[in-house]
Image (spheres, rainbow, N blue to C red):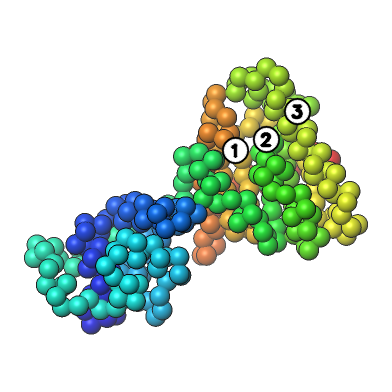
């Protein structure tokens, strides 16, 4: 621990950002100004506590430092993580005790346990906002395993180039793709719910299945075994993509709303592996759907 508060801890208090939600909102606003793809990359509550407690032995990642310098432009990252200069500390409001910050940062975690957000790391109001912050190439490039279940799986089949996907699988990536059956009843019910009268979802899903099956034919015989395509015919509730057995992108299907307009959640498997997070919940959902599906 530093013998005195580090500067970041003090300036966060002075600017009334000591409650995590306020800090997160201010961080994301600054991130947008620095670079749009950094939106939604605010540190977790636990990370922020480590930042402000003086426990770090080196600076955070460069992108974090860039955003912090945009939030507090009068200071460099090196200065923010150094002991607070006496003249800045002298400006502290007398009524605000340093111990209050720790209580503000940890009070929620104390009430609900060590994982208050069930390993959810980001939430976006629409899939479009999610895709802007996390484009497909940033998620999928270099992945060792991809498991996806949903309706038409446009992220894989329309937003990620065929040649890139081909190269991934040839290089060892395994891909399981589970589509809503274009010949089934559930997809027709979904078309009616979304207001389509021209078989739009059915046609798109058939096209996307063909994209993957055609790609599979181009693969070497060994790589073909790493690409599995299947369909299921059940009321659609979620679009789930699991990457590297660690990252989960989940989106619910809302009544009468296109998938593009639905909120999107990003969850990362807890390092403790205790099975209490949302990653494990949606991995189980995927596995159950896959088991009930029909391989093509």
Q: Please tell me which residue is depicted at 60% across the width and 23% down the height of the picture.
A: 194
What is the crowding at mark 3: few (fewer than 14 residues within 10 Å), some, or many (at least 20)?
Answer: few
Label 1 sits on residue: 238
Question: Of circles 3 and 2, which is in front?
Answer: 3
Separation (CA) of disc 3 from disc 2: 12 Å
The label nearer to you, 1 versus 2, is: 2
Q: Are marks 3 and 2 in contact (CB under 8 Å)?
A: no
Quadrant in which residue 53 is drawn: bottom left
Q: Please tell me how many numbered marks the rendered image carries.
A: 3
Q: Are marks 1 and 2 in contact (CB under 8 Å)?
A: no
Judge by depth and name the residue closer to the eye, 195 or 290.
Answer: 195
Residues 21 and 133: in front is: 133
Q: Residue at x 52, y 65 (%)?
A: 271
The residue singled out by tag 2 in the image is 151
Of the 4 image quadrants, the one containing the C terminus is top right
Residue 288, given in percent of the width and then of the height, sits at: 68, 43
In primary-sequence order, the first of circles 3 and 2 is 2
The label number, if any, that marks residue 203 in the structure image: 3
* The N terminus lies in quadrant: bottom left
Counting other residues with Cα less than 10 Å from the Cα at mark 1, is it few (<14), some (14-19), or many (20 or more)?
some
Relative to residue 58, is residue 273 depicted above or below? Answer: above
- Give the vertical position of 21 relative to 63 (above or below): above
286 left or right, relative to 294: left
Is 25 displayed left or right of 135 in the figure? left
Q: Assign a secondary structure to mark 3.
A: helix
Alpha carbon distance from label 1 to label 2: 9 Å
Q: Earlier in the sequence, mark 1 or mark 2?
A: 2
How far from the left and from the top, in percent, is residue 130?
A: 52, 46
Residue 168 visible in the displayed image: yes
30 vs 138, left or right, is left
Q: CA distance from mark 3 to mark 1?
A: 20 Å
């Amino acid at each position: 621990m530093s013998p005195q508060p580090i500067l970041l801890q003090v300036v966060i208090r002075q600017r009334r950002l000591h409650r995590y939600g306020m800090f997160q909102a201010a961080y994301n606003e600054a991130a947008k100004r620095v670079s749009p793809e950094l939106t939604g990359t605010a540190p977790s509550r636990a990370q922020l506590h480590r930042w402000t407690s003086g426990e770090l032995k080196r600076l955070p990642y460069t992108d974090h430092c860039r955003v912090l310098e945009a939030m507090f432009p009068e200071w460099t990252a090196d200065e923010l993580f150094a002991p607070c200069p006496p003249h800045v500390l002298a400006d502290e409001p007398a009524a605000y005790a340093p111990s209050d910050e720790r209580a503000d940062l940890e009070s929620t975690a104390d009430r609900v346990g060590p994982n208050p957000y069930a390993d959810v790391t980001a939430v976006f109001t629409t899939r479009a906002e999610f895709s802007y912050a996390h484009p497909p190439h940033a998620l999928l490039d270099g992945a060792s395993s991809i498991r996806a279940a949903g309706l038409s799986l446009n992220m894989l089949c329309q937003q990620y180039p065929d040649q890139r996907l081909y190269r991934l699988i040839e290089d060892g990536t395994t891909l399981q793709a589970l589509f809503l059956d274009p010949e089934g009843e559930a997809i027709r019910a979904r078309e009616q719910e979304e207001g389509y009268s021209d078989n739009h979802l059915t046609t798109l899903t058939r096209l996307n299945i063909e994209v993957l099956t055609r790609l599979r034919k181009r693969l070497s015989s060994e790589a073909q075994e790493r690409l599995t395509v299947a369909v299921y015919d059940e009321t659609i509730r979620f679009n789930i993509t699991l990457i590297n057995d660690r990252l989960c992108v989940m989106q619910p299907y809302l009544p009468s709303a296109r998938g593009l307009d639905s909120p999107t959640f990003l969850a990362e498997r807890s390092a403790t592996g205790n099975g209490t997070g949302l990653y494990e919940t949606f991995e189980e959902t995927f596995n159950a759907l896959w088991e009930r599906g029909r391989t093509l």
